[in-house]
DNA sequence: GAGTGGTCTAGACCACTAG
DNA sequence: TAGTGGTCTAGACCACTCC
């Protein structure tokens, strides 16, 4: 009556599945138990489990393969490659992407970063500065801030050597999977240093992209600030 | 066997519902028949109708209200106000938005617009140029290109006088509902004319936003090119 | 053929809205 | 109280994958 705390069964199942994902019991890329299995385990009908999985699949935490099973989503697939880096070449896809590590250091969180990542100012951080080069053309200059406690063993060598997205490294080596992110875009003028790296004049217009990434349960775990050169490239946004 | 043309029942129902929406038989904002009604009409179970409606709701073509019914989505609601204009003020929401009509004319489609909107070069177009002002601050300068045949009776007065989004005007007066859009973003420098209107120096960095909007069945029906001032405002993007 | 996800049904009951 | 969408069940059958 007075307490409107009604929660459908499938939501409760969804919570249980989320906890299993979050705990790392089911690793990225591997299959989770079948719907029938989960149904009998949780003492509900298959349809109820199905609805819970449906929601997790639509949030890109799981993906289904008819006839094979349901799997934990991963950042290792080609499909995801442009889901978090929404930059495309004016003429089709950008070619091979090369990642140049410019700087790797440990630092203390400033007030701004601390607020964004729900940390305390002064908390230990890892800072990565790098350049993304598309087919020989330097296009993205970015700085990545990560909580030092979560990424304790991260080294410059690991970042330098990894293949594919940073997020792939994070999930395979540190068990932290980025689930979604929010970006704020502004236009900015290149300063001398960033212009030199991106091979444009000082004052050249660039896209300034600020990102906060979240893992399970909407926990923010990464802050990025990037400068994108948009000569020959564009940022793609879908409105629905 | 050889023809893999298998289509689930609910997809066929979805197609029927889409046709009803597209034909204008169900007007924006009004209720569609109940699930039970549709189920008996199409000779399927309620669950099958439900799944079809679920998909249309997730695509924002319909929305449900428990206890009341299922309604045709509309651009008239507050909720939608920042779904297609993804600009927010650094400090909270932008205040009242004022729309200043700068120019209204008829023209012929150039090669580029024709390609974007799947028209022929030389086809009649309506061109709207306007300025969006947030609480006294000019922030967006944009040009809107529309197929002349679809918006035959559109007048400068109608555009000037309307309240709310242009898309609201389009759907109430012309029966054309914008369903989704794709935007390409670049950074650009203000020229003299646009700088004057947006009250920035010539050369000031701006966000250049190019949009193609689609109505039902992925038919493109609008092309826009806008310049956004991002001093005090940002473009919000969600990655999932 | 066995196991998985995907579709469809029929019926029961719950939550919400409105007269 | 009647009507709507929302949840849950149990069972049948289909489509796909792999052995």
Image (cartoon, coloured by chain):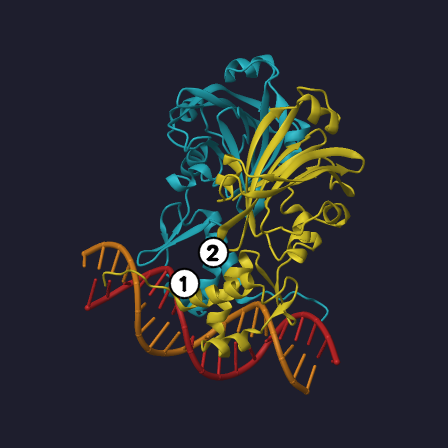
Chain colours: A cyan, B yellow, C red, D orange
Disc 1 and disc 2 in contact, CB within 8 angstroms: yes
The mark tally for this picture is 2
Kindly identify which chain the residue marked by label 2 belongs to. A
Residue B32 is left or right of residue B16, and the answer is right
Residue B198 is left or right of residue A59, and the answer is right
Give the quadrant of residue A194.
Answer: top right
Q: Residue at x 58, y 24 (%)?
A: A206
Q: Position of residue C3 (x, y in %)?
A: 29, 63
Q: Position of residue B55 (x, y in %)?
A: 50, 60
Up/down of B188 relative to A2, above or below: above
Kindly identify which chain the residue marked by label 1 belongs to. A
Q: Identify the mark at residue A38; answer none if there is no mark.
A: 1
Closer-to-camera residue (A99/C19): C19
Q: Residue at x 58, y 74 (%)?
A: B34
User: Can I make out residue A201 in this image?
Assistant: yes
Up/down of A154 relative to B2, above or below: above
Closer-to-camera residue (B231/A59): B231
Q: Position of residue A106 (x, y in %)?
A: 54, 22
Disc 1 packing (10 Å; few <14; some 14–19; many ≥20): some
The residue sitting at the right extreme is B136
- Quadrant position of the N terminus of chain B in the picture: bottom left
Up/down of A232 relative to A50, above or below: above
Q: Earlier in the sequence, mark 1 or mark 2?
A: 2
Badge 1 marks a residue whose secondary structure is helix
Q: Which residue is mark 2?
A: A17
Give the quadrant of residue B101.
Answer: top right
Residue D12 is left or right of residue A209, and the answer is left
User: Can I make out residue A118 in this image?
Assistant: no
Closer-to-camera residue (A126/D12): D12
């Amino acid at each position: 009556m007075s307490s409107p705390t009604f929660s459908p069964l499938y939501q409760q199942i969804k919570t249980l599945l989320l906890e299993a994902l979050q705990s790392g019991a089911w690793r990225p890329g591997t299959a989770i138990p079948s719907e029938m299995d989960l149904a009998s385990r949780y003492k509900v009908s298959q349809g109820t489990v199905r609805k819970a999985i449906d929601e997790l699949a639509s949030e890109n935490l799981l993906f289904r393969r008819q006839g094979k099973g349901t799997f934990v989503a991963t950042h290792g697939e080609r499909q995801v490659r442009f889901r978090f880096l929404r930059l495309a070449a004016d003429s089709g896809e950008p070619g091979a992407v090369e990642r140049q590590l410019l700087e790797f250091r440990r630092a203390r969180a400033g007030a701004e970063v601390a607020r964004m990542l729900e940390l305390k100012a002064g908390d230990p951080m890892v800072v990565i500065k790098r350049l993304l080069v598309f087919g020989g053309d330097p296009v993205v200059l970015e700085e990545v801030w990560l909580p030092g406690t979560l990424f304790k063993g991260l080294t410059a060598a690991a970042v330098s050597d990894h293949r594919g997205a940073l997020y792939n490294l994070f999930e395979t080596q540190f068990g932290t999977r980025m689930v979604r992110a929010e970006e704020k875009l502004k236009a900015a003028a290149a300063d001398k240093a960033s212009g030199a790296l991106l091979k444009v004049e000082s004052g050249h217009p660039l896209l300034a992209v600020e990102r906060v990434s979240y893992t399970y349960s909407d926990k923010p775990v990464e802050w990025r600030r990037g400068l994108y050169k948009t000569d020959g490239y564009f940022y793609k946004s879908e409105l629905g």
